[in-house]
Image: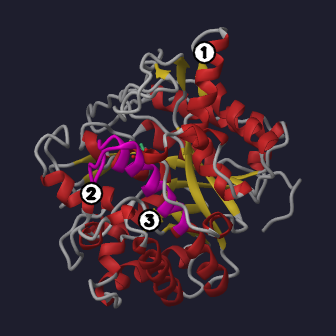
Amino acid sequence: MKKITLPEHSKLLDKSFLFGVATSSFQIEGARDSRLKSIWDTFCETPGKIIDKSNGLVACEHIERWLEDIDLIQSLGVDTYRFSISWPRVMHEDGSLNHEGLGFYIQLLDTLNARGIKPFVTLYHWDLPQFIEDNGGWLNRETAYLFQDYVDKVSLFFGDRVHSYATFNEPFCSAYLGYEIGVHAPGKTGVKSGRQAAHHILLAHGLAMQVLQKNSPSSLNGIVLNFTPCYPADDSESSLKAADYANQYINHWYIKPLLHGEYPAMLAELPDDQKPDIEANDLQIMAQPLDFLGVNFYTRLTYSAPTVTDFSDPEKSPFYTEHAHLHPQTDIGWEIYPQALTDLLTKILSDYNLPPIYITENGAAMADELVDGAVHDNSRIDYYQSHLLAVHEAAEQGVQIDGYFAWSLMDNFEWAEGYLKRFGLVYVDYQTQQRILKDSALAYQAFLLSRTHNDNHVNK
Ligand code: FCB
């Protein structure tokens, strides 16, 4: 079996560097309890939205199998586990707490803590309660305040059980995929709508950070952003310009308000009827100090000059043309290009005064085959190996990176792709719910358990 290794002196082998696995509520939990409907339940019911016509009602049955899953997590030798809280599971429609749902997470948190596995909690991984969407969802400014209220109540309830809180997972995906091009729930479209949703999510983040710093000052409080580095398709001036625009629209749109309290300059180039409504002080609220920034990385994209000049089709930008993914690709069609992860981390370090970074997601969908009870996913091991080296390289170049999470612990509901794309270290047989460690899980486990730890850094 292939191995995962890092140079002996690597900062990733310091005691303070945390390795983990990640999941999210809707993708694994299932819904056989009192949880309310979320926008993803509705989206799954909408014909044509999910490739295999599946839904999250059963998923990995994690609600029933959580203890077995914690055993699995522990067996991997990880330091930390990143998972998300399902807002519709822990709150009733009248804004009161749902104690049955909270009880589930308390059990999970207590068991993780008892076993020395640090809980990294994400408060929003896309499953907005449907009743809130019925009032406009992220297009309604009021949702930002409902989010703050949810975070206030839940963080008080969890007390000191949580090692780290991330307010949001990937605002880009919620806003752009969900409200601008409509390929994710709730399936709305329009540039103004996408930009408005992004604005309200970033506002909600700032409001929630204020509450977290009050209710839970000793946890690491921050946010998780996804980055898809944008490269010019060739050396021409016009491709460079297009890649820069894409980078502003896709990546800096989210990090810049958080760290600099302003949107990228290209906001001014959007027609007025596509700009988000922004109220006085919103940007100050967004730019709360962060204890950490979570970076999710999977791939990169290439760009050249735009082919359209009007703003009417949200899928075609008047600023750039986005090219199809180059090869080699994973099973979901995303280019494998680990150098982009080093480039990204060193570039954002030069652009911003960064808080400590955690790589909160990284991994690959591969066409796994279960043969005689084993999955020989060498290509996934290669992906992890090359990307861990890319993180190591960025750390060598001065980026403070404090942790790395593999996406994902186990195969799960991959959004619009349904169950067809497998990202897990652990194979899930959806007929029997049996979990089977793939070779990549065994390689990750062997790597984690072999750490002897450098002592270059003080332990946290
Ligand atoms: C990220 C999501 C995560 C998972 C991976 C493959 O964008 O945060 O839930 O779907 O992609």
Per the image, the residue denoted by label 3 is 124
Q: At which x and y percent is residue 438? A: 40, 40
Q: Nearer the viewer, residue 106 or 171?
A: 171
In reply to whether residue 46 is colored magenta, the answer given is no
Question: SS for tag 2?
Answer: loop
Residue stretch in magenta: 179-203
Q: Could you say whether the residue bearing mark 1 is in a helix, strand or loop?
A: helix
Q: Nearer the viewer, residue 397 or 442?
A: 397
Determine whether label 1 and label 2 are within 8 Å by CB: no
Q: Nearer the viewer, mark 1 or mark 3?
A: 1
Residue 119 x/y as whole percent: 55, 70
Quick one: label 1, few (<14), some, or many (20+) residues within 10 Å? Answer: many
Residue type of the residue flagged with mark 1: Ser
Q: Earlier in the sequence, mark 3 or mark 2?
A: 2
Can you give x and y, in whole percent of width and height, for residue 38 in the image? 25, 66
Of the residues shown, which amino acid type is indicated by label 2?
A: Cys
Examine the image and state in which quarter residue 25 appears.
bottom left
Marks 3 and 2 in Cβ contact (< 8 Å): no
